[in-house]
Image: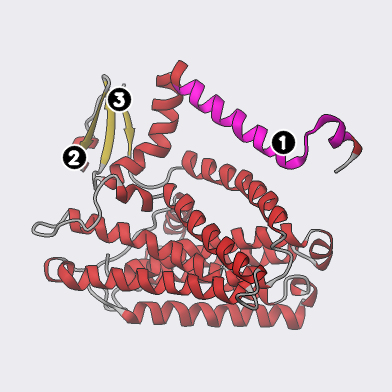
Amino acid sequence: MSIEDRATGLTPARAWLAAFAAALAALVGGSLVLRNLVYDRFVWQYFWGPVYADAHNAACAVKQGGETRLLGSDACASVAADAVVARPGYTVVSEIGYAVTLIFMLAGVLFLLRGLELGEDRTFFFALVPFMFFGGALRVVEDANNVAAATEGVEQAITYPLNALIISPVIYFVVFAITLATLVVAVFLDRRGVVDSYAPLVFGAGTVYLLATVGYIYALVTSGLASRTDAGFYPQVTVAVVLLSLLIAVAVFGALRRYEPGVVAGVGLIGFVVLFGHALDGVANVLAADWWQVLGLPFQYYPKHPVNSFIIDVTDRVLPPNVSDTIGDAWPFLLVKILAATAVIWLFDEEIFEESPRYAILLLVAILAVGLGPGTRDMLRATFAI
């Protein structure tokens, strides 16, 4: 702690806590004082409203005259102009909000890891990889739950308010809490000499969570959804997505090591995993959107994120129809993902790892999560035709 910190009592961790408390107070205070502006037209419309509508499998949720209604798609198109409408899914505003929250929370996690004296070695990164898959798989449980709610004769396995726990953004905090609890227990056992290292225990626990979640999805589909909907089991999707993602990651990482070794000198094998994670996100989107018939899927998938939709829309407008019909219009998203991942790993040179290894590894965990999590969700949705 610096002399100035000792004099003021304001360490970086305390400053973060103060900022968190101030932001929370402003949000709560604004929601109470300026309810219509702050809560209704910001918090509810872009963050909680979409969760509420999604949890009830509604096309939209509408706040008007002090009442909240859940509507179908036709009714959503004809609501009054002064009504506040929230639709399931992401918007530009919500994605910016999530990005800002992620950056802020990363700083808090950094202070937490410092307190636990964790995160400086690369095994920490690899130990958390299964949790990225687990987060995406857990989100598919809600997708399957929504299909059940919309299917006559099939009951939801998880009803409101419990299903809100596995809808964005609430699911991010749920997965974080599970990950943190697992990590703390593993570190406790490590430091008590019960296990030789916390990393294998964390990796194994994440793998168990993932397999249990995928098994639960399979049980949901085979126990009722498959007989009444198009849901089923299409393992060729997962095989194709994983193999193509691995091939792309191997090719790009190998080319970088041979022709531009400085790009991957700092990150090492972490760079390969980051490339794989973002390739999986891109490949899952491309196959589900443009090659669904080749894979034998019963229907086409459309992107749930504004960025994906924007790229596809631009490509569709730019390319001649005959070209789009032949090669599809989702492939530029895969290209963007690979280029972005390559740029990111290039930024993490050896100097960053020497000066701030914990911060570098934590950022790379977050970067992998925003690729591998959504990619896993898209891959498993297509695998089970949900």
Please give left or right for residue 154 compared with residue 122 in the image: left
289 or 115: nearer the viewer? 115
Identify the residue under disc 2: 74
Range covered by the magenta-colored residues: 4-31
Of the residues under marks 3 and 2, which one precedes in the sequence? 2
- Label 2, residues with CA under 10 Å away: few <14, some 14-19, many ≥20: few
Residue 154 quadrant: bottom left
Please give left or right for residue 84 compared with residue 110 in the image: left
**Position of the N terminus by quadrant:** top right
Residue 128 position, x and y percent, is 57, 67
Q: Nearer the viewer, mark 2 or mark 1?
A: 1
Residue 115 position, x and y percent, is 71, 53
Rounded to the nearest whole Å, what is the CA distance between mark 3 and mark 1?
39 Å
Badge 3 amino acid = Ala
Residue 139 position, x and y percent, is 38, 59
* Dominant secondary-structure state across the stretch colored magenta: helix
Residue at x 79%, y 66% (from the top left corner): 349
The reply to whether the magenta stretch includes residue 113 is no
282 or 200: nearer the viewer? 200
- Label 1, residues with CA under 10 Å away: few <14, some 14-19, many ≥20: few
Identify the residue under disc 3: 83
Residue at x 76%, y 80% (from the top left corner): 259
Identify the residue under disc 1: 15
Of the residues under marks 2 and 1, which one precedes in the sequence? 1
Mark 3 residue element: loop
Badge 2 amino acid = Asp
Q: Residue furthest right?
A: 3
Badge 1 amino acid = Ala
